[in-house]
Image (cartoon, rainbow, N blue to C red):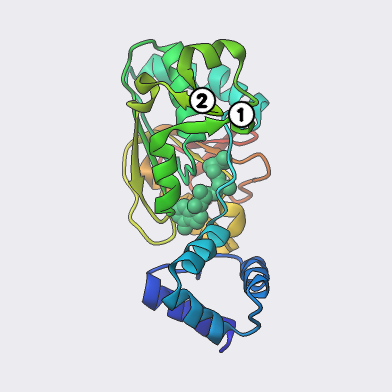
Amino acid sequence: MEFLEFQKRVYRQFGLNLEGYKEKQLKRRITSLMQSQGIDDFSSYFQLLVKDEEQLMRFLDKVTINVSEFFRNPDIFKSLETKILPDLVKNKPRLKIWSAACSNGSEPYSLAIMLEELTPGVKHQIEATDIDKKILEVAKKGYYEERFLKNVSPDRLKKFFKPHDKGYLISDEIKRRVQYRHHDLLNDPYGRNYDLIVCRNVTIYFTMEAQDLLYRKFSEALSPGGFLFIGATENMLRYRELGFEKVMPWFYRRAAN
Ligand SMILES: C[S@@+](CC[C@H](N)C(=O)[O-])C[C@H]1O[C@@H](n2cnc3c(N)ncnc32)[C@H](O)[C@@H]1O
């Protein structure tokens, strides 16, 4: 079985459409998984995924890659905190925010913490979505080992977390601020009227065409003047064509129509 046929079968059987992912990278990740099982053809591997749920979970994990941490790239989060958010809350008391591909919740909870400090008690609407249902359960629990918290100041740790087991639990107050939902960025419809969309460290796995489409859809999903915040290793080259103006590295504003 060719890789393309494998992709098609995965889509039909498990509803996971891999078409928008960079093929070489994806193939490399999947082949290394196959090798770890002593399998060297896609047909046998597909059969294994159909009958062995644990292998299927490992496959989904490998394809989606869940690495995340609180305030990932702290200097850039500082720009969000000091330059972008104050402007947004000045113009609108209650923001609508989307953390797209939120992984284990570190990202939306980081946003909720910053907003609680900026506008204490205000219940902004923070939606957080991911394609991986398992990681969404992790996010909802809100339990983190220390390695996820290295950018959290002692002050914030004291105020917004409580020690639990070998790590920390996010406070209920912050947890309540984030609504989680399953969503596939490449295949599901997008919401509307967001003031801020945070989408970091996922488009790197997508083809250029898929990235362009996604950025265009983000621009339509934003309110006029709303911001898109992207990952530290990302750069939207054709931002003008895609409906944005660049405010500073990693921050784009929806252009006026
Ligand atoms: C590396 S993590 C990034 C997490 C967080 N945004 C950050 O920057 O720390 C990538 C996340 O993208 C999710 N993902 C991969 N493909 C996706 C898709 N098509 N739609 C939505 N989420 C996807 C994965 O499940 C994973 O949780």
Residue that appears at 59% across and 45% down: 67
Q: Position of residue 240 (x, y in %)?
A: 55, 46
Quarter containing the N terminus: bottom right
Q: Are marks 2 and 1 in contact (CB under 8 Å)?
A: yes
Q: Give, as a three-letter code, the residue at label 1.
A: Glu
- Residue labelled with disc 1: 146
Residue furthest to the front in view is 165
Q: Give, as a three-letter code, the residue at label 2.
A: Tyr
Relative to 147, is 40 above or below?
below
**What's the distance in space between the residues labelled 2 and 1, CA to CA?**
7 Å
Residue 87 visible in the shown view: no
In the image, 133 versus 37, the foreground residue is: 37
Q: Position of residue 160 (x, y in %)?
A: 46, 17
Residue that appears at 57% across and 83% down: 42
Relative to 103, is 163 above or below?
above
- Secondary structure of residue under mark 2: strand
